[in-house]
Image (cartoon, rainbow, N blue to C red):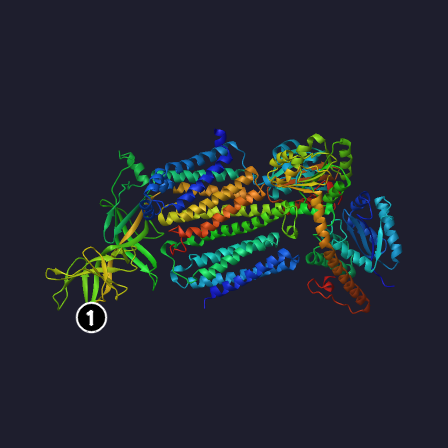
Amino acid sequence: MEQSLALLGLNHKSAPLDIRERLALLSASELAKRIKAEGTKEAAVLSTCNRFEVYFMPAGEAVETVGNRITALLEQISGAALSRYAYRFGGEDAVKHLFEVSSGLDSLVVGESEILGQVKDAYETARAADMTGKYFNVLFQRALYVGKKVRSETGVAIGQTSVASVSVQLAHTIFGGLQGATALVVGAGSMAETTARHLISQKILRLTVVNRTWEKARALAAQFLAEAVPWDSLPSALERADIVIASTSAERPILTREMIQEAAKTRQGRSLFILDIAMPRNVEEGAHGIDHVYVYRLEDLESVVADNMKKRGVELDRARGIVSEKVREFGLWEKSLGSGREASFKHSDIQEPSRIS
Amino acid sequence: MNYEVVFLKGALAFYALATAAAFVYLYNKDDKWSSWMFRLVGVGLALHLVSFGFGMHYFWKIPDNRYYFPINSFFGALSFLSLATVAVFFLIESRHQLGILGAFVLPWAVVGTGSAIIFANPAAEGLVPALQNYWINIHPVVLMTAYAAFGNAFGVGVALLIQEHQIKSRKPSELCYRLPSIEDLDDLNYRIIVWAFPVLTVGIIMGGIWAYSAWGRFWGWDPKETWALITALVYAGYLHMRFVKGWRGKKAVYVSMLGFACVLFTFLGVNYLSPLHGYLSGGG
Amino acid sequence: MTRILRSIRFNIFLGALIAFFSAVGTILPQIGQEPERANAFMQAHPLWTKFLSFFGLFDLYHSWWFMGILALMAVDIVLCKLWNKPPDAGIVALPPELTNEEDLETHLDKKEAALKLKPFQAFFTSKMGLDDAWKTARGHLKREGYAVKEEFFLPGTAGAFVGTRHRIQRWGSYFAHIGLVVILVGALIRSLFGFVEMVPVLEGGSRRMQRLFDPRSFSERVRELFWGHPWTMKEPVDVYVDKFTIEYYPGTMNPKLFASDARVMSGDQLLGQKVIRVNHPLDVNGVRFYQASWGAGGMFRSVTLKLGKETLQLPQRTPVKIPGTPFTVEADMMLPNFTVTDGQADTASLDLKNPAVRLMFSVGPHKTSPLWLLKNYPDICFTEDAQGQLTHAPAPPFQLAAIDPILFSGIQVAYDPGFPIVVLGALMWLLGMIALFYMHRRRVWILLESAGENSCRASLGAWSSRGTREYEAEFGALAKSLRSELKSEDNFQMTENPIVEVS
């Protein structure tokens, strides 16, 4: 029987945060060695905050058997029951999944480019552990190539279609990288939490939570490994924050123009991005007129989303088109391996795969 | 045939193509335009260097001009200033890979080389005695390098104003996602100015030292000197407002743009006022 | 009052004021820079002139109030620097809560919590004992150019220190501003003790300077003080130009070189002698003699007149008989750049772009009206009537073949005792700038905690005034090399974010 690629994994859609965290803490190179011992010819582990995926090629045994053994191994190491969160793909579907992952089509924030580096790291770690052969070398080189091609030729990275991801994207147009940014959540609510989660996935420096009820603030902070601040210190928390998510059920604005003006004075002109996703509004309208302060209300965000929706279909279709074209090409190459006359890839604009291995 | 002009025309053509590519890139998501722009600019820069080489060759045919740079004429000065602008852009671009800034900086190179070709006389002339000094290879070169950097900062400033306006409008267009972030643009604008400001002041001081060795005075309130001082004062104001008052973003950009207006006036406008530094009046 | 004076805002205001008035001075003609235009403007606008000259606006840069603003600015810079903390080039790169960095350093430095507030962090486990790790880490930081400070060490428990680099950046601002003040002081010294004087000397002649000056050198003055000689002596000084040379680029009227073989004399005493060229002045005890300009004043040794095949040499104002005729001819005036203004003969400039000579013919006591001949345009000729009005005349049968003019050499004498001070100030400015803008401060906090015999935990925190992105790479390299020095076998983690350690 012809050997082909298999994938075992879980991601932000299939598994809750605590399960993913346990897996993310494991050392990739250590894992790779143990997975090899479970009867795989080639293998690589892609581990990020949002996904944990094992790509492998069984050495002789059935895919099913090896897959079960790897699941058992992971459950033993992490101490969590994984099988009900995990998905499995084989053959062309696994290739397609990897290409979609590297293109950012499977990411929480669609089109984000960090995943490309993470795929590269996964491949390099596996290679350093001597876990890859010719097949994986070509596979991952192609995955990286497809990821770059999709990003440079389509607009998947722009055109987010949820309020939370649009907020993150706008934050990027104001601050660039968010590594140094501090976010402040005022109040609670599912949309605020989703937005905060998106921000955390962008590796922000810190997250502060403030609520009229101290216990609620504490609980939310604990959930995000964030810092809770008493309601009275809202003005000083405002001074430190770069991104504010306002989502309280207050009847009248709690962030007044004066308050924001005072905070802006101490910020030395650093931008302040306020997301007012509460109904009725939490932020006094005049605040948007202050220099360096950008207040986006829910309807502003929603109209950006609507705009993007219109454009996005086209861009996603284009991206998917590229991915399936590349999957087909890869399939041809895979077949040619068996026939003894290796086919070459059409595009010469990347390194020739045969030369890499 | 004057190869200096021929190659400069070639450089102009490539700069114009690069500018076009940069504008296409503004509205098209394909990174290939950005890398084309970068390559076109590279070729233009190479042609420009060859043109400058030929300019030097023609200039040195007059034995008394040897080994001074041909930047005494309006043609030479404009050509060199454009060369420096593109070179600084190339440097920034290769370090930051923003791609998008080409649309805001390269037009200056096109205007500079274009007006050198159209309005200025490329004929090499003998240096007047006052300019026969090694300082001519240093003082104007240093100053024009600073001017070129300020030109780049101006382009960054324009991009920042557009970006700021987009985000303030609450209806960001696609351009908004194409441009670097406000903070990044502000930082880049600041970084270029911080780099160029000491260069500018050192260039002015060098001019003073040359003036002392040629006329016995360090400072004579000649319009060109005075306007260079005004330019330095405006940029010093920018730096202080930023350091001390934390002015950033739009307000800081306005001050830096005022500074660039002074740069332009120092380079062009003052030629009508200055008896010592006039390129256009045919003087020194 | 001092609160206003020492505020940086006030200084920025003064800078703006200086910029504004400097700009005004480039638009309104200044007596010092362009005396002709200034005088023309004054004659054309008598009313305005009264008002403007009351405020010294025609000699703006030397007016008392402009000097006053400059002096006030110098004083203010000193006050600002004395009272205010230096502006930190890195202040804007800091996240807002880290601006009071000093407090953090003193109070929280050694705690891990403080490290987590630093913009850059790295954590790893070392396979070395605390003592060894401590020594290695300190040594490594020193080799990387960091100065080790604020050490604290509890044997067997933990050790911490701070490594700093380019602390000099803090002084850059002081240095640059003091340099600026020194430059202003140099300028003040020049305006108090220095002078500039234009001395036009005819070739072969001499001219006495208006200003008297002491011809002795500084050491002579000191020596002679003991013999009862005064510290300063005022002596008249004469400048001689024995020969003036001018060369043109071939085929043009653009001068390539002009030079005066000059002597400077005080009575019979020769103070200095040199062929002065532009950019190559003669130095007499600090007073410098520059070749500034040259011109033709209207004097000439002779002109050569061509009559058919014969030529005549005419010295200035000397009648010469034309052979074979009853006529005598006399050349009395030369204009170097002939032009017609209001119908009268005039010169547009003092260079020999279009020389013309006035000839007068006479037979016995009868004189014809004067005739102007142009050397470069032999077909053009003017007659002049008693009122000086010119009329075109038909081309005459004789031409000017050559003119041998007597040129004057414009020697500019300048004395600037402030110049070395200005250069010193400029140097300070430059060094200050380099320190302030190009040498970025870096601080690295290192905490080592013992974790058994042959193991310890290392935590690194860092901050730099350098752009965050640049420093990120530098810090990454530093942490990596430190990690290998400390024999760590961890999966390396560099994080800028305590929250996302899980990723």
Residue farthest along the left direction in this orientation:
C364
Closer to us: A199 or B198:
A199
Note whether C102 is above or below B33 in the view shown: above
| Residue ID at (45%, 61%) | B56
Residue farthest along the bottom direction in this orientation:
C309
Q: Quadrant of the N terminus of chain A?
A: bottom right
Element under disc 1: loop
Identify the amino acid type marked 1: Gly
Report the side of B185 relative to A350 (left or right): left
Position of residue C119 measured from the top left corner of the image (x, y, whole percent): 66, 40
| Residue ID at (36%, 55%) | B129
Position of residue C423 measured from the top left corner of the image (x, y, whole percent): 42, 43
Q: Which residue is mark 1?
A: C308
Corner quadrant of residue C316: bottom left
Q: Is residue A167 visible?
A: no
Closer to us: C119 or C64:
C64
Q: Residues within 10 Å of mark 1 (few under 14, many from 20)?
A: few
Position of residue C123 measured from the top left corner of the image (x, y, whole percent): 71, 41
Position of residue A230 measured from the top left corner of the image (x, y, whole percent): 72, 31
Closer to us: C46 or A308:
C46
Q: Is residue B229 visible?
A: yes
Corner quadrant of residue B107: bottom right
**Chain assignment, label 1:** C
Note whether A250 is above or below A116 in the view shown: above
Corner quadrant of residue C126: top right
Q: Quadrant of the C terminus of chain A?
A: bottom right
Numbered circles on residues, count? 1
